[in-house]
Amino acid sequence: MALALDPGALSAENQAYFEKCQEKLGFVPNVLASYAHDDAKLSAFAAFYNDLMLAPSGLSKLEREMIAVAVSSVNRCYYCLTAHGAAVRQLSGDPVLGELMVMNYRAAALSRRHRAMLDFAVKLTETPHLIGEEDRAVLREAGFSERDIWDIGAVAAFYNMSNRMASAVDMRPNADYHRQAR
């Protein structure tokens, strides 16, 4: 990252989180390392990420990763396109889908459900002031519950924030992401 921030002292919980990342992934994602200068901010970021992306939801893990990529594509966030593009490739088992999602999700052969979900997330990213009841109605017609619509909005909003932080500090993805699920 472009800022010369010294890592702070990590809480036992965050140290264990980094160790778990190292064990499961083989590395600590740079997004987490970038927050390591402030243990409280790292804790908040990790808790919000883990809740949105891993907690029980009507959205699958793949669907949440697809939202992350569609939003990050609009925002041209190199970090998130690389990291979450790898997740889409891995979770879908389809490297082509992962690449299409990064470049232009509209070029992918998506289900009606996924197209509606991603259209909503992109509209929320590009023109949030234009979101209206008709947009939520399209999601309901595609089979999303009220809670699912909340989750789509929350994931899209989180990645808009995260993309902006990554751009602000020139956060770069771990090289490992480029090789995953190809």
Image: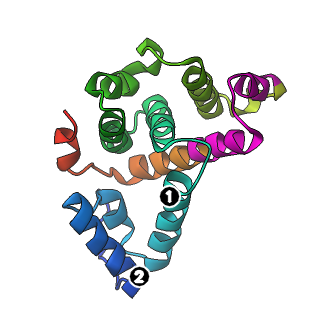
Note whether 101 is above or below 164 in the view shown. Answer: above
Q: Disc 2 vs disc 1: Cβ atoms closer than 8 Å?
A: no
Residue at the spot 63% in from the left edge and 47% down from the top edge = 154
Q: The residue under label 1 is which amino acid type? A: Tyr
- Residue 166 versus residue 107: which sits nearer the camera? 107
* Crowd around label 2: few <14 · some 14–19 · many ≥20 (10 Å): few
Note whether 117 is above or below 33 in the view shown. Answer: above
Note whether 101 is above or below 86 in the view shown. Answer: above
For the N terminus, give its image quadrant: bottom left
The residue that mark 2 highlights is 13
User: Mark 2 vs mark 1: which is more N-terminal?
Assistant: 2
Determine if residue 11 is in view. Answer: no
User: How many angstroms separate mark 2 from mark 1 (CA)?
Assistant: 15 Å
Magenta stretch holds residue 122: no
Residue 128: x %, y % from top left: 69, 33
Magenta stretch holds residue 150: yes
Q: Residue furthest right?
A: 133
Looking at the image, residue 178 sits to the left or right of residue 142; the answer is left
For the C terminus, give its image quadrant: top left
* Crowd around label 1: few <14 · some 14–19 · many ≥20 (10 Å): some
Residue at the spot 20% in from the left edge and 40% down from the top edge = 178
Dot 2 lies on which element? helix
Residue 95: x %, y % from top left: 27, 27
Residue 89: x %, y % from top left: 31, 34
Determine if residue 181 is in view. Answer: yes
Give the number of marks: 2
Residue stretch rendered in magenta on the structure: 134-156
Residue 49 circle label: 1
Residue 179: x %, y % from top left: 16, 40
Dot 1 lies on which element? helix
